[in-house]
Image: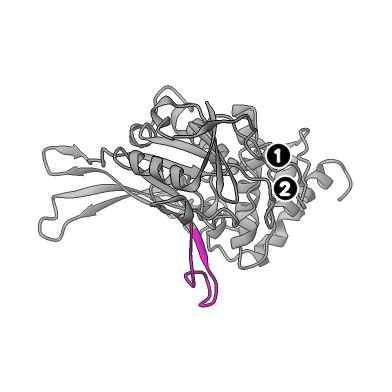
């Protein structure tokens, strides 16, 4: 059902939904950014539509809702273990197409990547419904059109905002609590970006892995991992067993975000380590985003949100790296 209503009626609908859902959306926090005079836009709980940031790209993705930064999986003693509890309240998340397509990539990895689904991911994923925020403006470093992630249709509700009028495309009847007038419209989507990329499909992974283009990143990348942590599709994690001081035979197991770009991630027993150089790690990340994932699932992992470029303190551009790969593969650069 597609309807039009004003902000006041929309907020009344949110009040009804808040009885059943915790509602999250991009919110701008003044002076909370990297520097004292910069803002931070991230996903937080909202009360009304005026809290939602419609004019800025969020600095972080929504993936931490279903893949927490620090997640307790279970508690253990000498003889038994207990799975951690979760808040039973459901989640309603307002997000743009790039982040919603990022969730699709996470689903592939944790739900469709083998015989068994990831139990801890699935139980959080089942709680979440998504509201697609219409996005017609391309932001800094975005190249979502090239990655075919500028549009999405797997949402529970779509939303456009026109000054004081709200347009809703309600697909999920559980969210049909809004009092509005029937109105036909299409949810906004970005039609062009300032940046465009073309991913080559004739990649010889073995030959490309040996190319000297990756040596540049040995000097440039500082292994901070910020590109991974802001990315909506990065899924690397490590496991930690935490033993309590009161009783060292009792504790908890946690799944914690990790980064393939950070020192020590590939360390193995005996002191062995893969991908010691930053160029090797950059090659691994790039190939995973535009080649390996595609071979398994049939589409690219990267959604073109540009957050990795935004966050990198060394101004390393992922889109420019893709261009370099294309030139090497096409024989334009030796």
Give coordinates of residue 263: x percent, y percent. Answer: 50, 60
Front-lying residue, 160 or 121? 160
SS category of the residue bearing label 1: helix
Identify the residue at horizontal 70%, vertical 45% (top origin).
209
Residue underneath mark 2:
210
Is residue 201 positioned above or below 24 on the image? above
Front-lying residue, 129 or 213? 129
Is residue 161 positioned above or below 104 on the image? below
Q: Which residues are magenta?
A: 26-41
Is residue 36 positioned above or below 264 on the image? below
Q: Quadrant of residue 124?
A: top left
Residues marked 1 and 2 touching at CB (< 8 Å): yes
Residue underneath mark 1:
206
Q: Quadrant of residue 245?
A: bottom left
Is residue 92 positioned above or below 281 on the image? above
Front-lying residue, 308 or 168? 168
SS category of the residue bearing label 2: loop
């Amino acid at each position: 059902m597609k309807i039009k209503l004003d902000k006041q009626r929309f907020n009344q609908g949110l009040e009804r939904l808040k009885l059943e859902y915790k509602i999250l959306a991009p919110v701008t926090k003044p002076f909370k950014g990297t520097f004292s005079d910069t803002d931070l836009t991230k996903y937080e709980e909202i009360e009304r539509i005026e809290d939602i940031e419609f004019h800025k790209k969020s600095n972080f993705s929504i993936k931490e809702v279903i893949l927490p930064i620090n997640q307790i999986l279970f508690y253990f003693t000498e003889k038994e273990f207990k799975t951690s509890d979760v808040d039973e309240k459901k989640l309603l998340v307002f997000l743009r197409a790039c982040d919603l397509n990022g969730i699709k990539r996470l689903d592939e990895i944790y739900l469709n990547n083998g015989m068994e689904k990831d139990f801890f991911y699935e139980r959080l994923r089942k709680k979440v419904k998504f509201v697609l925020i219409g996005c017609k403006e391309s932001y800094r470093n975005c190249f979502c059109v090239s990655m075919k992630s500028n549009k999405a249709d797997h949402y529970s509700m779509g939303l456009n905002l026109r000054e004081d009028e709200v347009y809703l495309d309600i697909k999920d009847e559980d969210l049909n609590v809004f009092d509005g007038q029937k109105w036909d419209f299409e949810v906004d989507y970005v039609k062009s970006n300032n940046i465009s990329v073309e991913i080559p499909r004739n990649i010889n992974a073995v030959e490309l892995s040996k190319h000297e283009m990756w040596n540049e990143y040995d000097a440039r990348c500082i292994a901070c991992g910020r590109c991974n942590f802001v990315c909506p599709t990065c899924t690397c994690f490590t496991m930690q067993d935490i033993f309590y001081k009161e009783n060292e035979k009792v504790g908890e197991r946690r799944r914690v975000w990790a980064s393939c770009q950070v020192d020590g991630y590939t360390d193995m027993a005996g002191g062995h380590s893969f991908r010691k150089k930053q160029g090797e790690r950059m090659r691994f990340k790039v190939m995973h985003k535009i080649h390996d994932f595609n071979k398994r699932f049939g589409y690219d992992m990267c959604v073109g949100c540009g957050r990795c470029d935004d966050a990198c303190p060394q101004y390393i551009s992922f889109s420019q790296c893709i261009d370099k790969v294309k030139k090497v593969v096409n024989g334009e650069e030796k």
